[in-house]
Amino acid sequence: MSAIGELQRLNTSTGGPPRKRDTKAALLFLLPWFAGILLITAGPVAASFVLGFTDYNLIQPPEFNGLENIQRMLTDERLHHSLGVTFTYVFVSVPLQLAAALGLAMLLDRGMRGLPFYRSAFYLPSLLGSSVAIAVLWRQIFGAEGLINQMLGFFGIEGTGWISDPDTALSTLIVLNVWTFGAPMVIFLAGLRQIPVMYYEAAQIDGAGRWTQFRRITVPLLSPIIFFNLVLQIIHAFQSFTQAFVVSGGTGGPSDSTMFYTLYLYQRGFHSFDMGYASALAWLLLLIIAAFTAVNFWAAKRWVFYDD
Amino acid sequence: MRKVLVGALAALLLAGCGGSGGGAADGDLTSDKIELRFTWWGSDARHQRTQQVIDLWQKDHPNITVKGEFKEWNGYWDSLATTVAANDAPDVIQMDELYLASYAERGALLDLGTAGKNLAITDFDAKALATGAIDGKQYGLPTGVTTYSLIANTDLLAKYNVTLPDDATWTWDDLKSVGDRISKASGGEVTGLQSWGFDIGGVNIWARQNGASLYAPDGKVAIPADILAKYWQYLLDISKQGIAPPASVSVERAGAGLDQSGTATNKSAIGTWWNSQLTSLAKASGQNLKLLRIPGEGTATGAYYKPSMFWSISSRSKHPAEAAAFVNFLANSQEAADIMLTDRGIPANTKIRAALTGKLEGTDKAAAEFLDSVKVGEAPRVTPNGASDVEAILKRHTESVLFERETPQQAAEAFISELQAGIDAA
């Protein structure tokens, strides 16, 4: 099992410069990022924390109102509903997306002809997925007279307006998120490349089938990568905004069926002139994401296998 | 410590707000090169007309560039809230009755009464002016008045051989049966009616015909739940009986804007609109459209003149005098009125209105004549501060009713309590 570790050690030690220079170079490369976060992100984040304890209508100066915003969260039914929508979205779309990513990565890993082309083709949706253009396209495809219904029409099936029907609207957004499996796929592909072929050869000689090979070799050796993708995609999904905003025209409709947490927060802040409450909501989202990430790391001890 | 933090934050947020750089609203116009930002929502037809008016004004004011920022209704208010919060509001703002109190009572709008010589309001009808005033301060100058109506596609009516009853006396049941005949005659190609649970005009009319009103004079929600429930029951009935499109189609169209409505695309024969929208709709439709009075007006008057929209100026404008002069041109210039015609309502400026009436043609003329033919009651109370998202609440419950996720009664009760909560919090 130490073959991979051995390889890594070999890779990093060939002609390795002194550690100090590494650190300096790293800091230098990180400098633009630090500048960005300090100048652009940190200020508003701190401000929103303070605003979370105020009544602030965007136009007049904020007024301190203690824990009122937090009390409101407890009884705000639309907030609870938006949490439900967001959790459904995260827990349905992320596993499906990762499964699709892993499946395709394993297919592509077989060294087929034209691999770079397929890799790019599958990666493309990830670049476009959260863009306004794709969300607009989605509206057209899933509209009452859209592509999907025209295709169904060939088979004599009458489809609904997928995006304007509260029973199906969220599903179209889940499909959209699953479709952007390219980013985790590329990472899986890199991970699969790291698993030495000799393990599979040895397993084959011992008579292990494809499923056993997958379960006993691929999954354990790939588990750090799976974990990485899982954490990243969960955080990403919690923060989804553009898709729901564009597809529902900013309303979270029909009947609040696509009311993501972020969209509700946005509506409170900018439609209802309720920026104090919206700021408190933003911090609640941060806490929720932090909690899920912490749980993820805790659970990881049980199933993620680090080979070193 | 907390107070210090909040105070510091407030200071940060308000930094620069007090800038009196441009001087007073009644001061002399500058001869420096400046830029005024002017924002409005509307259809393509309006954008073209407005740009022509801007070009006309700039001929006389070569040092002032007016930059038009136009949007579709839904995106407009998001954008306005964000720019006002960022202390980057456009100087001249097209304002709606729904939002007037929300912006004015929070100090975002200039009292136009302070513009003195730069902005004349003497030619305006006093009743119309009052719709833009709050506590004696003129925060909005009404561009025109408009009234709720039905717009029928007469080409479709002729095609399916359906004749209309007298619209002075017809009832809601008559409308239903007319719609039903059109839907059936077309074999599903078009629907007789277009669903209208997405704008507040329909609710106002319904309440008033039933002897109620949406808001009481003190700004509290006053419509009884059972009256509102009947309104939604009607919409649910026409949707389920195929008189109006199925729920998902209605919802999709409601989110897509005027140019993609059933009326504009000739897919619904009759829809509810403000009468001033006739020209934009006729342009998009390309067929013959006709204004009709709302059903039920024969027995109880629900109709009213709504200020179609207002001209407002940001209280933080750096060029209030120039902005006021530009609004003066929009509101008082005959040249400008000759271009805009009735697109922003039949002008509330009485001189302009008198001069314009003879010049109107086609749909503009029809819209003006229709307005005069409608019997109206007192205008409803201005939408209270905190209720500006009333249409979003209405739309959500209409969706729930049409998809039968809520009964009309449940929707009515939830609507009332949500709306009241918003007003209480403001």
Image (spheres, coloured by chain):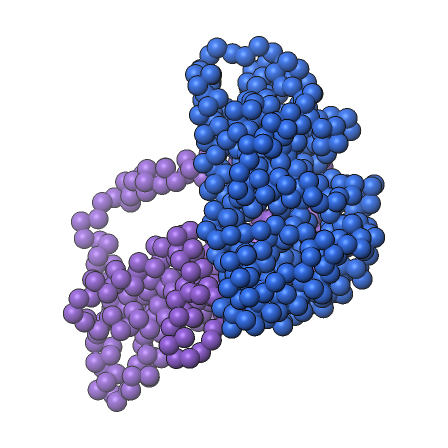
Chain colours: A purple, B blue
Task: Kindly identify the residue that appears in the image at 62 percent across and 36 percent down.
Answer: B346
> Between B219 and B10, which is closer to the camera in this rendering?
B219
Task: Kindly identify the residue that appears in the image at 45 percent across and 36 percent down.
Answer: B48
Q: Quadrant of residue A32?
A: top left
Q: Check the image and report above or below for A149 versus B138.
A: below
Q: Is residue A76 visible?
A: no
Which quadrant, please, contains the C terminus of chain A? bottom left
Question: Measured from the top left, where is residue A37 in percent x and y?
Answer: 45, 39
> Between B106 and A269, which is closer to the camera in this rendering?
B106
Question: Measured from the top left, where is residue B407 in percent x and y?
Answer: 72, 68
Q: Residue furthest bottom?
A: A207
Question: Measured from the top left, where is residue B304 in percent x and y?
Answer: 73, 44
Q: Quadrant of residue A253?
A: bottom right
- Does residue A303 appear to the left or right of A198 in the view shown? right
Question: Measured from the top left, where is residue A147 in percent x and y?
Answer: 39, 66
- Does residue A169 appear to the left or right of B230 in the view shown? left
Q: Is residue A72 visible?
A: yes
The number of discs equals: 0
> Between B330 and B160, which is closer to the camera in this rendering?
B160
Q: Quadrant of residue B236?
A: bottom right
> Between B405 and B212, which is closer to the camera in this rendering?
B212
